[in-house]
Image: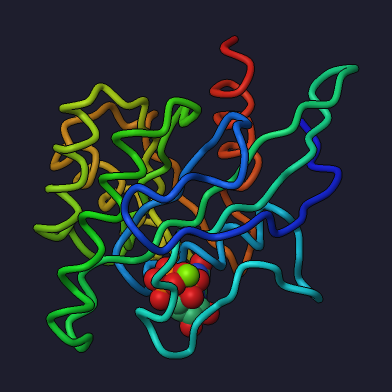
Amino acid sequence: MKLKSVEFAGAIGRPGQAPPGTLPQIAFAGRSNVGKSSLINRLLERHRKQIARVSASPGKTQEINFYKIRAEVGDADDDFFLVDLPGYGFAKAPESVRAAWRPLIESYIGNSRELIGVVQLIDARHEPTKEDLKMVEYLASIEMPTLFVLTKIDKLKPAEKIKRVNENAHLLGVEQDQVVAFSSTSGEGRDELMESLRHLLTGD
Ligand code: GTP
Ligand code: MG
């Protein structure tokens, strides 16, 4: 699968607000600062002109942002939305901001008929947080196809890396091959993740 073009399609900031169209959607979830926007930019190979805003101050992305992607799958073109969810659980954010993510994210995830899967990001250096596990539990409860990505893998030594993948898979209750080790700086894991996204989109 090759990504041919990307454009910002719109954002939603209130529970119940409709997405900017009815294309199939793949959403990216994770705690604030986990590296969602960086991963999206790396997937899109937008090094020079970044489309998803990478925040110096975590917790900045408080809306659900939709990017319309045109992908080349085999001989055909396929359009879908890549969805950047607001990061949850940023400790320094005011309580009102911290509490706001759940209704917005759950209203979107629970009601979007076009959502075909969620990519759940976890920081490779840490165990899943309480909020990560709550999110994973929620996704399982609605039987949402979920892929797991361990971000910032470049910050770990090779031996540590294998250990963290195994530990996280165990804590998340999934097989190791459902967990992709990823680095936005080196591009490690990009091909593997792209293949999983293709699988989600085409169903084979
Ligand atoms: P919010 O939008 O605030 O929820 O954050 P986010 O999850 O979108 O994280 P973002 O991509 O903005 O990255 C947060 C910080 O982590 C930035 O300083 C990035 O440069 C850094 N970062 C993200 N991914 C990686 C990675 O794979 N490796 C390294 N070394 N740093 C990374
Ligand atoms: Mg972001």
Q: Nearer the viewer, residue 112 or 98?
A: 112
**Side of 15 where 18 appears, left or right:** right
133 over 12 or under it: above or below: above
**Side of 133 where 70 appears, left or right:** right
**Residue 120 x %, y %:** 36, 46
Q: Residue at x 21, y 41 (%)?
A: 136
**Residue 161 x %, y %:** 36, 55
**Side of 182 where 6 appears, left or right:** right
Q: Residue at x 75, y 59 (%)?
A: 45
169 over 59 or under it: above or below: above
Name the quadrant of the N terminus: top right
Q: Residue furthest top?
A: 204
Instruction: Mark yes or no: residue 155 visible.
Output: no
Q: Nearer the viewer, residue 70 or 133?
A: 70
Q: Residue at x 16, y 79 (%)?
A: 96
Name the quadrant of the C terminus: top right
Report the coloring of the rendering: rainbow
Q: Residue at x 63, y 64 (%)?
A: 186
Q: Quadrant of residue 144?
A: top left
Q: Residue furthest left?
A: 130
**Residue 140 x %, y %:** 20, 28
Instruction: Mark yes or no: residue 24 visible.
Output: yes
195 over 57 or under it: above or below: above
